[in-house]
Amino acid sequence: MGIRFLLLDEDRKFFSLISDIFDVTGHKLLVALDEQKAKDLLEATSFDIILIELKHLNFWLNTIKAGKYPIPMFFIERYEDTEKLKALGFTDLNFVLLPFNPLDLLTKAVWLNRGEVEPKQLSLIGPVNLLMHLLRRSASFIMSLKASEKNCSIYIKDGQIVGTTCDLQDLREILAFEDIKIELFPYTGESYPEEGSLGNEEFFTSLFLPAFLFTQDKVQDKALSLPKKADLTQPIELEKGLFWVGVQDSKFLLHSNVYLRIYEREDVKIPLLINTGTLEDYAQVKAKIEEILSTIDIVKAVILLDSGAHEYATILSILQSSPKLQVITSMNVAKWLNKSGVPMSRIRLIDSLPGMKLKLSTGDVLSIIPTPFSPYKGSFMLYEEETGFLFTSHLFSSLRAPEEFSLFDDPDVDDVVLYASLSMPCSKAVHKVLESLENLPISKVFPAWGNPFSENTLRIALKSLKTAEVGTDLPTSIDENSYFEVINRILAQLDESEFLKVKEELERYVYFEDHTIKDTLINRSALPDLFVAVMRSTGINPAFTKHAIRELFYAGILVNL
């Protein structure tokens, strides 16, 4: 028998992505475009699974109030939210991360809807999903939950939760564990739980709402964390002896971080430059360095963490400005620098360093952490053993609108993951790097692009990146005809003056009918990159451009940064 799905799709983002797979698998899918329509459908018929965004968690709780028990599956945008869902007793089966493969969604749904589950598979299904099964069947069971040294039993009689052997706070603590042992025992009603319950509605609302108000999360975060303002036209001291001499991108999302690190002990002073920025940024970078050191000639070396066309051009300018300066980099990057005109006598290879450690006369030790193919073959990170500072290239960088860019406030983890998804070649390369960082005491991350961030944010980012699919591993099975649908949806969100500016540029490559793209004169696969480039060149608000990139990404369409 097929599974009955209800999709609540207020923003009309998901139906086009999943409708095809339902057409060929025999499962039934009904769509509601608002909560009232979804409520009407729930009153008219029953559903096995409800597909919703996280903002509709309260709506799902209201279905329990109405005596309906569909199992929820969530479309997740922020990786942090997966951990919060798991802490409420849901499992990996209850969510799909955008972008997603519709087949993965269906596979998880089949698991969730299994009528009979072997005892050893109960933990895989999870406590909340099992409760939904028992309540909809009007069953009578005792569900025993054990995690670490904690335990609690939930008593269900004829499809009603009649009580527990622990209070709700203890139950929340148990649900927060990753490994929960679950057992089911028949309940005849002869024994009574210690903590009585007033029914299913109060049990779930009391259990969930105090623990995590999803819809208010972002608002609360912003209210509690006011950004520190800094004059980014000036060099900024981030830590003692560590200066930001980079450039903010006022027109797009790529803020170039160049760091001047001055190692000092007694009479010895060693200034090193980490990253270079673009050739366009070089004049500003040089001016900021010379405001600190009086002349760039004092800089001993540039540590080049990876290779790219803009680094080669900038390095040539820096070397011309400072005849004694050396470049410290990997063999693979050095080859390209040499082909670009940099003599090998000006390059010091990290491959030749004993133990891959750069030991300075100040006593400081800088460890080299190779990050091959993240995203370039010769990429690496620089780790300060004394401070725990980690300097990175593209990995751990983030896409940030100008108003979001800060040297003192951590980025949203989903911005870090989005950057990695679009810039890294594949998941295997990223996972290999993450393994090398597992036992490293890192106090702060200083990426090449976007906001630096703290140990706590790093911990969340590591978890998110370990489960994320990036680059070629991302699901990108979208029909190229759907490019028009997604881009037209984004165009419709522009005001008239912005739309006309974008349309004027695009009309050289596409055919418009009224306000929508109907056909293209170029390969359709090139249209998303062209669209983002046009938004950038016509001065569309970078925050909206970021929104557009994310909308494309969620639809399975990747763009080049």
Image: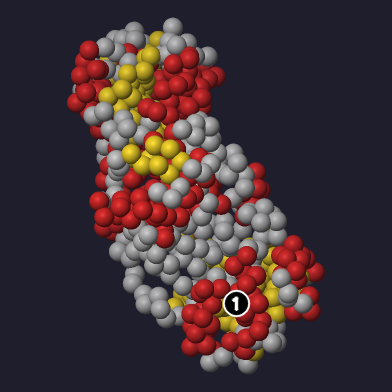
**Which element type, helix, strand or loop, lies under badge 1?**
strand
Q: Please state the horizontal and vertical placement of residue 122, each as a whole percent of the image.
A: 49, 20
Q: Please state the horizontal and vertical placement of residue 275, each as a whole percent of the image.
A: 59, 71
Q: Residue at x 39, y 64 (%)?
A: 251
Q: Please state the horizontal and vertical placement of residue 199, each as a whole percent of the image.
A: 23, 21
- Residue 377 appears in which quarter of the rendering? bottom right
Q: Is residue 468 left or right of residue 53?
A: right
Q: For the residue carrying disc 1, how many other residues have a C-alpha within 10 Å: few (<14), some (14-19), or many (20+)?
A: many
In the depicted structure, whether residue 251 falls above or below residue 80: below
The residue nearer to you, when weighing 166 against 115, is 115
Residue kind at label 1, given as amino acid type: Leu
Q: Residue at x 58, y 62 (%)?
A: 393
The residue nearer to you, when weighing 373 against 15, is 15
Q: Please state the horizontal and vertical placement of residue 127, each as a whole percent of the image.
A: 41, 25
Q: Is residue 85 left or right of residue 339?
A: left
Q: Residue at x 55, y 39 (%)?
A: 474
In the depicted structure, whether residue 511 falls above or below residue 398: above
- Residue 112 appears in which quarter of the rendering? top left
- Residue 143 appears in which quarter of the rendering? top left
Q: Is residue 516 left or right of residue 523?
A: left
- Residue carrying label 1: 273
In the depicted structure, whether residue 465 falls above or below residue 390: above
The N terminus sits in image quarter: top left
Q: Residue at x 62, y 89 (%)?
A: 297
